[in-house]
């Protein structure tokens, strides 16, 4: 299964949520890999705490591979190469956790050629043979990278794939997320131009809300009644707005609560962070865990 | 001088095994040339051979620049309708001249790469089985692409019963006093150094491919048994995770089935040490014992329920 992670705007927590989902999926016993296709800013290595590739890899990155400058992209075994002690041993029963870093100083793709699409197809095909889940972090907004993966998936009709669109729970983001999918030159437009069936593609897209502050969250206990009432009114307004823009509950796969750890340092939330050091909230870890299950649960992906 | 090759082996990307006739279609890479199929003791289908022209540096342990020009022979195979391979090799020989000749010269010698200038066989052998410098002749890239061709066939449904990595076997064959050395490197990389009596024949390639198939089977069964976490998970769950091995792998073990008589001593020596079949048998027994234990547990649970 290929899962493409995209967001309407930068700063939505796409990468940190994507990596956490992949990490949880590995803990659930699956072999997973994470491809950093965010060529302008390949920093997934930092989230996995692999300092050697914190800003992408100096050699054999995905960018070089796609340009035909190396035969195979570099693979980083996170269980072996992470600097974080809690990640450096593979927990019993966990699957492989592999990062394919982007190229250091790579820059966005400037054009889409047939050769690049061919290499992308080859890469996806091979990874899909050996990994239960391949998550591809596509950069924010409309880009050649998004076009590339749309063009590649057309060429491999038998390979299952899904899209996750990450957005924050604000007016701007809801409108932008809808635009990214259904707007002019959005995913559906570009996808159908490349040969995807529009409705089929729509069924493969779900939204994930990030940094969500629930009106009944524990963090809001100290607020004044007026503030709480205002927040609650905002929330229902947003729900109504989301419903109108096709970003509502039915198209949503999950939501990640606001968590200080994710706000201040993008990192994997381990069980140790929740139980031992207690810096992260149990709800956040549970949300990642649930998303990691839902991503492959067909009942969560039935036609809308 | 020497022959170098690389075999990539993987699980055919289909839900079940494919029939002999489907094998023929999947491997029919070239119109007009037929797929060779042998049926006993296991169905083995071999594609026609294709050539790739190369003019590039050859990997040398001394990192000296050695230029080779010629053609690489590649082919694909499917064993038991389940295991797919892409395989490439070249015979490296000294060129009679120091400059590149017209392509017609190289095309009339399929599978031969001529070295322009000086080169030592030992340097090349070490370089190829060691850590080849980037930019050198990369037979793995060629073999990988041929395996991709098979895996991307529209006749396959791509719903493989389990996920498993490919393995690569890089081999070097020379003429001399018989010896064989098989080495495991990373989880997916293996090398083989073979010295055989008499001149090279394509039967040596068959031997290497046969070894690669069985090494892949053994590696994959080990992975599946590890994933089952026998003892750490409830019996029924472990057995469910072992099921793909029973359904798809355990009947494929046929060592040296396609190896010519004069090369079988090499297989026999590997059977003595490290002992491929010994390890395979012990794994298979372990899987079967788990199934038997689980059946017993189920039977006694059913009997218990009946008494109540």
Image (spheres, coloured by chain):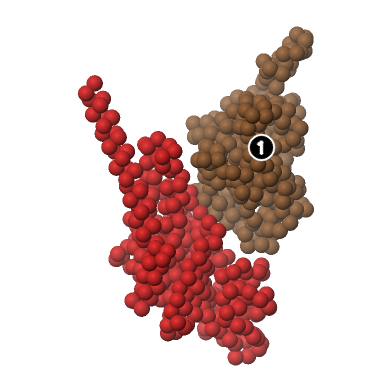
Chain colours: A brown, B red
Identify the residue at the far top of this view: A225
Seen in the picture, residue B96 relative to A147 is either above or below; the reply is below
Give the secondary structure at mark 1: loop
Query: Looking at the image, can residue B18 be seen?
Result: no
Compare residues A299 and A115 and report the one nearer the observer: A299
Across and down, in percent, residue B250 comes to: 35, 53
User: Which corner quadrant holds the N terminus of chain B?
Assistant: bottom right
* Residue A132 located left or right of residue A51: left
Across and down, in percent, residue A28 comes to: 52, 37
* Residue A93 located left or right of residue A111: left
Q: Callout 1: few (<14), some (14-19), or many (20+) C-alpha neighbours within 10 Å?
A: many
Query: Looking at the image, can residue A294 be seen?
Result: yes
Identify the residue at the far left of this view: B307
Q: Residue at x 63, y 90 (%)?
A: B97
Q: Residue at x 71, y 50 (%)?
A: A53
Seen in the picture, residue B170 relative to A35 is either above or below; the reply is below
Quadrant in which residue A271 is drawn: top right
Compare residues A275 and B6 and report the one nearer the observer: A275
Across and down, in percent, residue B125 comes to: 56, 76
User: Which corner quadrant holds the C terminus of chain B?
Assistant: top left
> Given the image, what chain letter belongs to the residue carrying mark 1?
A
Across and down, in percent, residue A72 comes to: 62, 59
The residue to which callout 1 is attached is: A268
Q: Residue at x 41, y 66 (%)?
A: B273
Q: Residue at x 44, y 38 (%)?
A: B232
Compare residues B133 and B162 and report the one nearer the observer: B133
Compare residues B291 and B159 and report the one nearer the observer: B291
Q: How many marks?
A: 1
Seen in the picture, residue A184 relative to B152 is either above or below; the reply is above
């Amino acid at each position: 299964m290929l899962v493409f992670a995209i967001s309407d705007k930068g700063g939505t927590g796409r990468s940190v949520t994507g990596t956490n989902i992949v990490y949880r999926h590995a803990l659930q016993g699956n072999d997973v890999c994470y491809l950093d296709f965010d060529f302008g800013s390949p920093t997934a290595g930092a989230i996995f705490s692999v300092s050697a590739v914190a800003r992408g890899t100096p050699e054999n990155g995905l960018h070089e591979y796609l340009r035909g400058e190396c035969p195979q992209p570099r693979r980083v075994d996170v269980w072996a190469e992470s600097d974080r002690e809690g990640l450096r041993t593979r927990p019993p029963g966990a699957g492989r956790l592999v990062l394919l870093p982007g190229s250091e100083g790579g820059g966005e793709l400037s054009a889409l050629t047939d050769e690049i699409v061919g290499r992308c197809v080859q890469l996806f095909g091979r990874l899909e043979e050996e990994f239960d889940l391949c998550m591809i972090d596509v950069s924010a907004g409309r880009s050649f990278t998004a076009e590339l993966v749309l063009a590649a998936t057309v060429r491999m009709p038998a390979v299952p794939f899904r899209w996750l669109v990450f957005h924050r729970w604000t007016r701007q983001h809801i409108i932008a997320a809808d635009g990214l999918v259904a707007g002019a030159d959005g995913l559906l437009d570009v996808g159908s131009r490349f040969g995807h069936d529009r409705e089929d593609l729509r069924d493969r897209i779900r939204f994930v809300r990030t940094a969500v502050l629930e009106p009944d969250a524990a963090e809001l206990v100290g607020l004044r009644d007026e503030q709480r009432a205002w927040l609650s009114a905002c929330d229902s307004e947003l729900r109504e707005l989301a419903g109108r823009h096709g970003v509502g509950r039915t198209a949503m796969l999950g939501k990640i609560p606001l968590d200080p750890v994710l706000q201040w340092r993008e990192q994997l939330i381990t069980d140790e962070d929740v139980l031992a050091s207690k810096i992260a909230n149990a709800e956040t870890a549970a949300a990642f865990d649930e998303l990691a299950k839902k991503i492959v649960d067909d009942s969560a992906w039935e036609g809308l | 001088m020497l022959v170098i090759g690389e075999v990539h082996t993987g699980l055919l990307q289909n839900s079940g095994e494919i029939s002999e006739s489907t094998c023929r279609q999947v491997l029919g890479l070239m119109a007009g040339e037929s797929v060779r199929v042998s049926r006993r003791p296991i169905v083995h289908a071999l594609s026609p051979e294709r050539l790739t022209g190369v003019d590039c540096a050859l990997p040398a342990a001394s990192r000296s620049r050695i230029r080779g020009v010629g053609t690489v022979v590649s082919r694909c195979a499917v064993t038991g309708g389940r295991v797919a391979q892409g395989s490439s090799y070249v015979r490296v020989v000294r060129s009679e001249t120091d400059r590149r000749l017209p392509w017609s010269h190289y095309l009339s010698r399929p599978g031969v790469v001529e070295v322009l200038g000086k080169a030592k066989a030992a340097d090349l052998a070490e370089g190829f089985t060691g850590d080849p410098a980037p930019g050198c002749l990369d037979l793995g890239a060629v073999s990988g692409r041929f395996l991709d061709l098979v895996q991307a066939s529209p006749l396959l449904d791509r719903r493989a019963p389990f996920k498993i990595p490919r393995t690569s076997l890089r081999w070097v064959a020379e003429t001399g006093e018989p010896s064989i050395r098989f080495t495991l490197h990373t989880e997916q990389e293996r090398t083989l150094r073979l010295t055989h009596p008499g001149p090279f024949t394509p039967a040596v390639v068959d031997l290497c491919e046969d070894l690669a198939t069985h090494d892949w089977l053994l590696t994959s069964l080990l992975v599946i048994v590890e994933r089952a976490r026998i003892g750490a998970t409830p019996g029924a769950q472990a057995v469910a995770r072992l099921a793909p091995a029973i359904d798809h792998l355990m009947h494929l073990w046929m060592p040296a089935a396609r190896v010519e008589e004069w090369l079988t001593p090499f297989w026999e020596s590997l059977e003595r040490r490290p002992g491929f079949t010994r390890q395979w048998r012990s794994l298979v027994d372990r899987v079967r014992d788990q199934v038997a234990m689980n059946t017993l547990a189920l039977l006694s649970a059913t009997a218990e329920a009946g008494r109540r």
